[in-house]
Image (cartoon, helix red, strand yellow):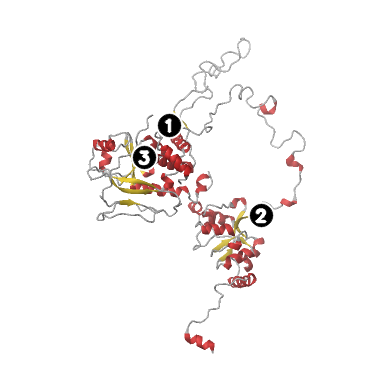
Amino acid sequence: MSLTLRLAFYPRLHCVVRNVVTSCSKGATDTVVVPKSSGAPLIIQDKWKDDKGAVEGREAWVETLDNSTNSTQLGLIHLNPRIFASYPRLDIIHENVVWQKKSRMVNYAHTKHRSEVRGGGKKPWPQKGSGRSRHGSIRSPLWKGGGIVHGPRAFTTQFYMLPYHKRVRGLISTLSAKFAQDDIKIVENLDMPSDEAGYLEQLCEDRYWGPSVLFVDESDIMPRNITLATDTLGHMNLMPVYGLNVYSMLKHTTLVLTVGATRLMEEKLLYNLDRPDGRSLVTRFRK
Amino acid sequence: MASRGTEKALSLLSRLPRIELQNLKPNPGAKKNRTRGRGIHGGKTHGAGSKGSGQRQNFMRLGYETGNNPFYLRFPCQNYYKGHHLKVSYVPLCMGQLQKLIDTNRLRTDLPIDVTQLINTGLFNIKPLEKEGGFMLQDDGMDHFRATVNLEVQWASEATIAAVERNGGVVTTAYYDPMALEAAVNPIPFFKRGKAIPRRMLPPQHLIDYYTDPKNRGYLADPKLVANERLKLAQKYGYPLADSAILKPTDAKLKEYYLA
């Protein structure tokens, strides 16, 4: 497979500034919101209370889905390295994908047990005297056409819950891996000037956003235009933050997050990384 | 956390093909294909041996040793374990550990530190059903204990009491009966049961003396006697008490009066 240039086209940052509303995250103590009047570039930086300090943070462009503006890049956002630059545990990502698939899978394959196969209630021939081997039923597993002993039984599920911290690590690893491979795009919000699918498709093509795109916003009520645009497109989907999962993130090539969604997600994941009641999530049937 | 290994891994990833559902795989050795025992590997007698009660699924009772006096019947009752099922044990809480919890912000000093707060840190667990009575304050690390706390434990020695009071803190020993302890250790499930909150029982006979003794800062002791003991302990160990300091007058007239 040839190495494709996955770097997005970065135009020079013009001094176009918008009032970006960022969510007030629990962990953040200092959010920079630049007003419209000033000519300074937009930099969204949060200082996290429990910053480990010694690692270099990650930065990403804040873009807009509005092609009518001067430049599609609005400014810069600082991302928490514990979420977007953690070690990409591919084995945990694999476990998460397997868990998601197996948990919802229902096996409908079914074989009949000897009691379910039609017939076989009568003893075929008397116990002694016929010279043939002794049998009690013509549908025993020994017989051709008889019941299957350990065959698949319909509606078999393989539901299980992956340990809590593996699921958290899975999300973090996927985000880190995707960020490292330039497949995460941060947008200001999901507002679009047009509600046509063609507009969105053209936009994604111009920006080299992969064949499939997953748009993630804070709440499950999305702006009208993008809802209509993605309605007919199967390869472009909308998702609220609470629906974020490893399988969907890998199924779609590009992951487009809004600033609010990013901050909300960071807050939740950071809390779950070192919460004091972590033991209660791991012990079973004890309360 | 981006250590050198992490940075290397992430920079590697940026040059490798995109991670997709198609190119994921488990760690080597993680996947084990479980096969049903057939033929050579678990067939013929299927682990049941040959003949005898085992193969015929008519097993001997547990502990039976085919006729000789079994182990569980050989020894008579021993006195050393008499009443073991009635004895209550306490979870140790070292002073050094307490200091570390306060320093790392896992415990707040502005609120009283009792059983519930200690359990909420997530580092301790008390099982009232296994005859655990609560926390006991241990003297490991009391020499460098610096925090001012309002502490409530179930057992404390003289030295530990002195260590807490030296820093201006307050320590009390309180008895929690098993039901009350269950509620204190896990308050939310307790309240969800919707039952009326029962009264906390008084300590049993053999513990009444302990909790009424001001020397142990018992919660049933007379507060005046407790204050007296506090003063005595400060004098014994040789540290000043904040509230027993003699405050000199600041008013000019009073100063003049006392000088004369």
Residue at screen point 65% across, 65% down = B209
Q: Toward which corner of the image does residue B178 lie, by quadrant?
A: bottom right
What whole-number distance in Å separates the C-alpha atoms at marks 1 and 2? 59 Å
What whole-number distance in Å separates the C-alpha atoms at marks 3 and 1? 18 Å
Position of residue A243 in the picture relative to residue B49 (left or right): left
**Who comes first in sequence, dot 1 or dot 2?**
1
Disc nearest the viewer among 2 and 3:
3
Both marks 1 and 2 on one chain: yes
Q: Secondary structure at mark 3?
A: loop
What number is the disc on residue B23?
A: 1
Position of residue B65 in the picture relative to residue B197 (left or right): right
Q: Residue B236's spot in the image, x, y percent?
A: 65, 71
Disc nearest the viewer among 3 and 1:
3
| Amino acid type for the residue under numbered disc 1 | Asn
Q: Residue A144's spot in the image, x, y percent?
A: 52, 15
Subunit under mark 2: B
- The residue that mark 2 highlights is B87
Subunit under mark 3: A
- The residue that mark 3 highlights is A182
| Amino acid type for the residue under numbered disc 3 | Asp
Q: Residue A120's spot in the image, x, y percent?
A: 53, 18
Disc nearest the viewer among 1 and 2:
1
